[in-house]
Image: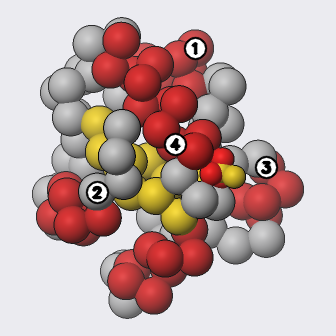
């Protein structure tokens, strides 16, 4: 569950990838990455199947600094999701993804 920004950027170039913000609704409302959907890290195990029934779909996770996305990654991997990437911190990703879409 190391942060892998390079893997995140390349996964996001695949059209079937899903960018997931695992922070709180308040944090998300203050600003999020373009194209991200929000599922709180404590809800992701219960909710992932409704957005990503295909367990081989690339899932790119981020939070404030990488801790909650690491926890979410662990639970998704335990559920059998095979392509889960911890993209790390919102502030680090924002300049890299600003021009996306
Ligand atoms: O967003 S965080 O859980 O890394 S503080």
What's the residue at 37%, 83% (across, down)? 96
Q: Nearer the viewer, mark 3 or mark 4?
A: 4
Gap between marks 4 and 2, in whole Å? Answer: 11 Å
Where in the figure is residue 61, as x and y percent of width and height? Answer: 44, 47
Which quarter of the figure is the N terminus placed in? top left
Instruction: Name the foreground residue: 10 vs 18.
Output: 10
For label 2, the residue is 4
Instruction: Name the foreground residue: 17 vs 91.
Output: 91
The colour scheme used here is: secondary structure
Which of pointers 3 and 4 lies earlier in the amino acid sequence?
3
Q: Quadrant of residue 54?
A: top left
What's the residue at 45%, 74% (across, down)? 93
Which of pointers 2 and 3 lies earlier in the amino acid sequence?
2
**Residue 86 visible from this viewpoint:** yes
* Residue found at the very far front of the displayed protein: 2
Which quarter of the figure is the C terminus placed in? bottom left
In the image, residue 25 above or below residue 27: above
- Asked whether the beta carbons under mark 3 and mark 1 sit within 8 Å of each other, the answer is no
Mark 1 lies on a secondary structure that is helix
Mark 3 surroundings within 10 Å by alpha-carbon count, few (fewer than 14), some (14 through 19), many (20 or more): few
For label 1, the residue is 46
Mark 4 lies on a secondary structure that is helix
- Which labelled disc corresponds to residue 25? 3
Gap between marks 4 and 1, in whole Å? Answer: 15 Å
Gap between marks 2 and 1, in whole Å? Answer: 25 Å
What's the residue at 76%, 47% (across, down)? 24
Q: Which of marks 4 and 1 is in front?
A: 4
- Which labelled disc corresponds to residue 69? 4
Q: In this view, does 71 lie to the left or right of 16?
A: right
Mark 4, ligand 1, within 8 Å: the answer is yes
């Amino acid at each position: 569950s190391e942060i892998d920004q390079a893997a995140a950027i390349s996964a996001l170039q695949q059209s079937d990838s899903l960018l997931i913000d695992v922070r709180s609704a308040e944090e998300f409302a203050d600003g999020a990455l373009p194209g991200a959907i929000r599922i709180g890290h404590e809800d992701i195990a219960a909710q992932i199947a409704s957005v990503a029934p295909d367990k081989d779909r690339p899932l790119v996770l981020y939070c404030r600094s990488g801790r909650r996305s690491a926890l979410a990654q662990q639970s998704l991997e335990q559920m059998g999701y095979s392509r889960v990437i911890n993209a790390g911190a919102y502030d680090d990703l924002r300049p890299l993804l600003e021009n996306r879409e």
